[in-house]
Amino acid sequence: MKKNYFKAITIALSLTVLSLATVNCSNSSNDEDNTTPNNQQPTTTQYFHPPTWIQGTWGVTNGTTSNKLYKFTADDFILLVTGVSEQSMTGTIKSSPNGGSVNETANNGTQYNFTVKYNITTTTQSFEFRKVSATHIQWKDNSSNTWFDLVKM
């Protein structure tokens, strides 16, 4: 009697495991869960929209040494640490917990300002640039309220 009871329990457990394996190994794909309506791919947020006049690499030079400081692309603002690294502000926002946002203003083809706000903190970073010529812009150091000359590299 004990043998039959043990066999019944073993068979019942085997059937339960088999049915769970069948359910968990279904042929269903989660691809449908990762698309937006009408099977469109999710959109990627573009945080920066620098005007064409400022796109490129900008820095300072004294005739013997040059330091690249900033690079503007069609969709990003990059801080350059001479000889060391590049810090994409889009990458920084995306890697920040809870992300962030950018508030931009560009006016009259001579001014480009933006503020980056990180959602997890009250930290903001503000930048102001103004065009002097096609190869010369100015950057405002907000801590000293001073404008500095930058040249296109």
Image (cartoon, rainbow, N blue to C red):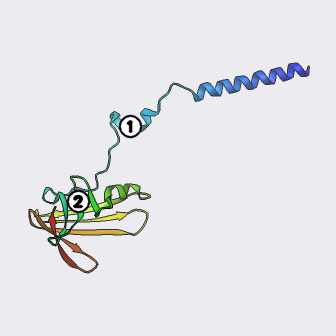
Image location of residue 121, percent across then percent down: 42, 67
Question: In the picture provided, is 64 more to the left or to the right than 43?
Answer: left
Label ID, residue 35: 1
- Depth order, front residue of 67/52: 67
Splitting the image into 4 quarters, where does residue 84 fall?
bottom left
Image location of residue 87, percent across then percent down: 33, 59
Label 1 or label 2, whichever comes before in sequence order: 1
Kindly identify the residue that appears in the image at 40 percent across and 62 percent down.
119
Q: Secondary structure at mark 2?
A: strand
Splitting the image into 4 quarters, where does residue 76 fall?
bottom left
Label ID, residue 19: none
Q: Residue furthest bottom?
A: 144
Image vertical order of residue 2 relative to residue 103, above or below: above
Kindly identify the residue that appears in the image at 28 percent across and 64 percent down.
82
Q: Residues within 10 Å of mark 2 (few under 14, many from 20)?
A: many
- Depth order, front residue of 148/39: 148
Q: Secondary structure at mark 1?
A: loop
Q: Residues within 10 Å of mark 1 (few under 14, many from 20)?
A: few
Kindly identify the residue that appears in the image at 33 percent across and 34 percent down.
38
> Could you tell me which quadrant the C terminus lies in?
bottom left
Kindly identify the residue that appears in the image at 25 percent across and 56 percent down.
48
> Could you tell me which quadrant the N terminus lies in?
top right
The amino acid marked with disc number 1 is Thr
Image location of residue 15, percent across then percent down: 71, 22
Question: In the picture provided, is 13 more to the left or to the right than 102?
Answer: right
Q: Which residue is mark 2?
A: 71
The amino acid marked with disc number 2 is Lys
Image vertical order of residue 33 relative to residue 91, above or below: above
